[in-house]
Image (cartoon, helix red, strand yellow):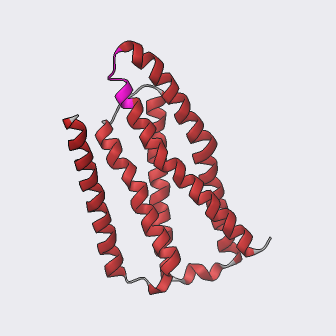
């Protein structure tokens, strides 16, 4: 199969993986908040949210993660010279963090499927931004490669993190006013 076809498939599954990673914490937030509603509402909402999370996690997130990783390995086998490039090694470091993020999210998923609430909805809102920061880092590294200025990149990621935190605080303040 031609290299660019494999690259396209890798990119498609990275996109679907991130789509799942962006949405699953949102379902966790709804699940956590549903448990705080009256018993009738919770009895309806919690099973539905667990079903939605199970379908998202098992039908989209895990298969996409496996396929994105598999196609990435295939690309590296076809072009092992990429492993000699500094930007690729750093990108793979961020991908490693993404895999850790995925595995921790899996633990959160399993706990919520057992109705074990270990985190607050506010924590989940913060957790949700982890995937965003990793996406920015990975995409900028993949696109800019050697032209990426690391100082500006690091400052940019830090600024993004601060902006996301401020946005979450502003949203929390607005919710508390309602």
- Give whichever of 141, 40 is nearer the camera: 40
> Is 6 rendered above or below residue 61?
below
User: x and y percent of residue 135 in the render?
Assistant: 46, 62
User: x and y percent of residue 78 in the render?
Assistant: 71, 76
The residue segment tinted magenta is 32-38
Q: Residue at point 61% right, 45% down?
A: 60
In the current view of this chain or complex, which residue is farthest to the right?
1
Taking 155 as reference, is 24 left or right? right
**Does any portion of residue 108 appear in the rendered image?**
no
Quadrant assignment for the N terminus = bottom right
> Is 115 rendered above or below residue 176?
above
Q: Residue at point 30% right, 42% down?
A: 123
Taking 2 as reference, is 132 left or right? left
Q: Is residue 141 magenta?
A: no
Q: Residue at point 52% right, 25% down?
A: 48
> Is 64 rendered above or below residue 158?
above
Q: Quadrant for residue 81, please give it.
A: bottom right
In the current view of this chain or complex, which residue is farthest to the front?
178
User: x and y percent of residue 107 in the render?
Assistant: 46, 40
- Give whichever of 63, 9 is nearer the camera: 9
Quadrant assignment for the C terminus = top left
In the current view of this chain or complex, which residue is farthest to the top?
40
Q: Is residue 33 magenta?
A: yes
User: x and y percent of residue 8 in the render?
Assistant: 68, 67
């Amino acid at each position: 199969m031609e290299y660019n076809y494999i690259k396209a498939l890798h990119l498609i599954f990275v996109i679907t993986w991130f789509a799942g990673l962006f949405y699953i914490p949102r379902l966790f937030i709804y699940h956590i908040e549903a448990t705080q509603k009256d018993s009738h509402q919770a009895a309806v909402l919690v099973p539905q949210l667990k079903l939605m999370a199970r379908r998202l996690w098992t039908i989209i997130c895990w298969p996409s993660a496996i396929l994105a990783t598999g196609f990435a390995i295939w690309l590296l086998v076809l072009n092992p010279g990429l492993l000699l490039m500094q930007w690729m090694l750093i990108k793979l470091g961020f991908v490693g963090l993404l895999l850790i993020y995925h595995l921790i999210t899996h633990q959160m998923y399993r706990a919520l499927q057992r109705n074990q609430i270990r985190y607050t909805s506010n924590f989940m809102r913060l957790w949700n931004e982890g995937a965003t920061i990793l996406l920015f880092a990975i995409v900028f590294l993949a696109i800019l490669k050697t032209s990426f200025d690391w100082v500006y990149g690091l400052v940019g990621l830090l600024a993004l993190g601060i902006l996301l935190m401020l946005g979450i605080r502003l949203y929390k303040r607005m919710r508390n006013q309602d």
